[in-house]
Image: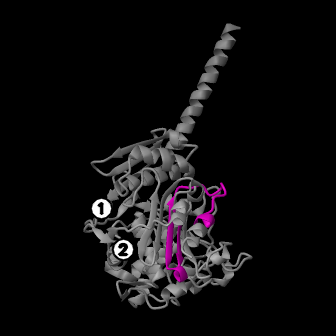
């Protein structure tokens, strides 16, 4: 009997050891996409928030990483090398290892272990003039309106995880408040608000005569098939007809594009056509990346400095950093960091119709085109999307003036532009989208204070 028990025990141990070895081999040689994506996300978030936003690494891990990856973040080994400005992340310290590398002016890029970016960093912007009033500098003359202050300081209206609220009226910051650990100088990730900046960069290439809205035959890989009929305007309006899943199910396309693809434009470009171009609205980060690739190609040798030289520098957005994938394509679907004052500058730029300091940077009427409705984006209450990667408040049930349009991003990033009231309202944070919080009441309260 003892021999039998000993044999059974040894057999069980052997089975367990073989299982561990098999699992280790699987994780080591062919880790699942989910783990690779989690490691990549953590590496990128820590790298960007530490080296761009200058936030404390432990705070970033405890908030941003834990918030996005609640099931695995405790099993992620995160190593920060401040001297090399590099972050390494691995599951259980051994598997699905990913790396993110920082470069001055370019942010962080996901790279292989011994890889270095194939592009030089950019020199820092000259510092803004702190004493000058915004937008020329960072100075503010804040309102003492009790209704306005009550709205900004109401925790319910602010929403969970609020990081910044800024109100601009008639070209001046009149109110602002920030979450704990954040201030006016902290660069914040705009997520999909980046799409609108990306559309404006395409607009600059159009003004330069290097791109056009009606251009088709956009990529050589589309020659000879129906995708050759997709136009720049279709990409802007999210009506390309290309297959794309922006949901949050298993391996959704945005996560694969941002965390796994070395060439984001190729990942989006190679999708199948599932609807004739221009006939169906499908919100797609892939379309934004393709648009970024097009204006980069149009800009030619100047592409890498194009956002800074043609947009950020003229607007005084000295904190702005647009990040790229390993191939060098700007991630125009979601990876622009800028502080709240600079995001507000871009919102004011749109309110002014693409004009800044008396200079018309975008073609006259281009911002009106950007906020004109895409008819096929009708969701029962009227069109919800504009032709230039902007949202239309009137199509989403907001009780706001009819000319209101919005930039919106993941985790409740919102910039609301109301030309008739000379208002730009920014709300940024890290707020779950399944808890029922909406910025609608905050916006209504701020607008009411300016009647």
Whether residue 394 sits left or right of residue 338 in the image: it is: right
Q: Position of residue 263 (x, y in %)?
A: 46, 66
Q: Residues within 10 Å of mark 1 (few under 14, many from 20)?
A: some
Does the magenta-highlighted stretch encompass residue 437? yes
Q: Report the residue at 43% width, 74% height from top.
A: 346
Whether residue 416 sits left or right of residue 126 in the image: it is: right
Q: Looking at this view, is 61 or 450 the one in front?
A: 450
Residue sticking out furthest to the right: 380
Residue 217 is at least partly visible in this image:
no
- Residue under label 1: 104
Q: Look at the image and tell me in which quarter the C terminus lies.
A: bottom right
Q: Report the residue at 46% width, 85% height from top.
A: 353
Q: Which residues are magenta?
A: 414-442
Question: Which label sits on residue 257?
Answer: none
Whether residue 118 sits left or right of residue 187 in the image: it is: left
Q: Look at the image and tell me in which quarter the N terminus lies.
A: top right
Does the magenta-highlighted stretch encompass residue 37? no
- Describe the element under mark 2 as helix, strand or loop: loop
Residue 446 is at least partly visible in this image:
yes
- Residue under label 2: 135
Q: Looking at this view, is 29 or 97 the one in front?
A: 97
Q: Residues within 10 Å of mark 2 (few under 14, many from 20)?
A: many
Q: Looking at this view, is 145 or 305 the one in front?
A: 145
Image: 412 above or below 383? above
Q: Position of residue 11 (x, y in %)?
A: 63, 22
Which callout, 1 or 2, points to the residue nearer the camera? 2
């Amino acid at each position: 009997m003892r021999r039998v028990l000993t044999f059974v025990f040894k057999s069980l141990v052997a089975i367990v050891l073989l299982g561990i070895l098999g699992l280790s081999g699987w994780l080591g040689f062919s880790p699942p996409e989910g783990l690779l994506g989690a490691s990549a996300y953590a590496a990128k978030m820590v790298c960007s928030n530490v080296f761009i936003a200058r936030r404390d690494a432990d705070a970033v891990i405890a908030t941003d990483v834990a918030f996005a990856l609640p099931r695995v973040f405790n099993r992620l080994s995160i190593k920060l090398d401040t001297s090399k400005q590099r972050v390494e992340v691995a599951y259980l310290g051994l598997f699905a290892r990913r790396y993110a590398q920082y470069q001055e002016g370019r942010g962080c890029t996901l790279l292989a272990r011994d890889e270095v970016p194939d592009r030089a960093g950019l020199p820092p912007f000259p510092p803004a003039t702190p004493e000058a009033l915004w937008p020329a500098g960072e100075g503010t003359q804040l309102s003492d309106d009790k209704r306005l202050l009550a709205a900004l300081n109401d925790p319910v209206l602010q929403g969970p995880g609020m990081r910044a609220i800024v109100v601009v009226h008639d070209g001046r910051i009149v109110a602002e408040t920030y979450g704990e650990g954040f201030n006016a100088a902290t660069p914040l990730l705009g997520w999909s608000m980046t799409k609108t900046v990306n559309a404006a960069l395409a607009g600059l290439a159009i003004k330069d005569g290097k791109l056009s809205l009606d251009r088709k035959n956009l990529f050589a890989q589309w020659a000879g098939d129906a995708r050759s009929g997709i136009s720049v305007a279709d990409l802007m309006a999210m009506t390309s007809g290309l297959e794309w899943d922006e949901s949050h199910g298993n391996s959704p396309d945005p996560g694969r594009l941002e965390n796994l693809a070395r060439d984001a434009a190729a990942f989006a470009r190679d999708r199948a056509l599932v609807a004739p171009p221009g006939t169906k609205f499908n919100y797609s980060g892939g379309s934004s990346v393709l648009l970024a690739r097009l204006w980069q190609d149009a800009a030619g040798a100047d592409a890498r400095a194009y956002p800074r030289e043609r947009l950020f520098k003229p607007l005084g957005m000295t904190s702005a950093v647009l990040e790229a994938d390993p191939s060098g394509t700007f991630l125009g679907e979601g990876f622009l960091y800028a502080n709240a004052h600079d995001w507000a500058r871009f919102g004011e730029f749109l309110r002014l119709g693409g004009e800044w300091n008396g200079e018309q940077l975008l073609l006259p009427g281009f911002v009106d085109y950007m906020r004109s409705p895409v008819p096929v984006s009708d969701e029962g209450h009227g069109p919800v999307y504009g032709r230039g990667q902007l949202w239309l408040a009137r199509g989403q049930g907001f009780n706001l003036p009819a000319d209101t349009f919005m930039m919106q991003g993941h985790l409740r990033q919102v910039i609301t532009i109301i030309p008739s009231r000379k208002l730009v309202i920014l709300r940024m944070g890290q707020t779950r989208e399944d808890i029922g919080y909406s910025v609608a009441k905050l916006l209504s309260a701020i607008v009411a204070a300016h009647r």
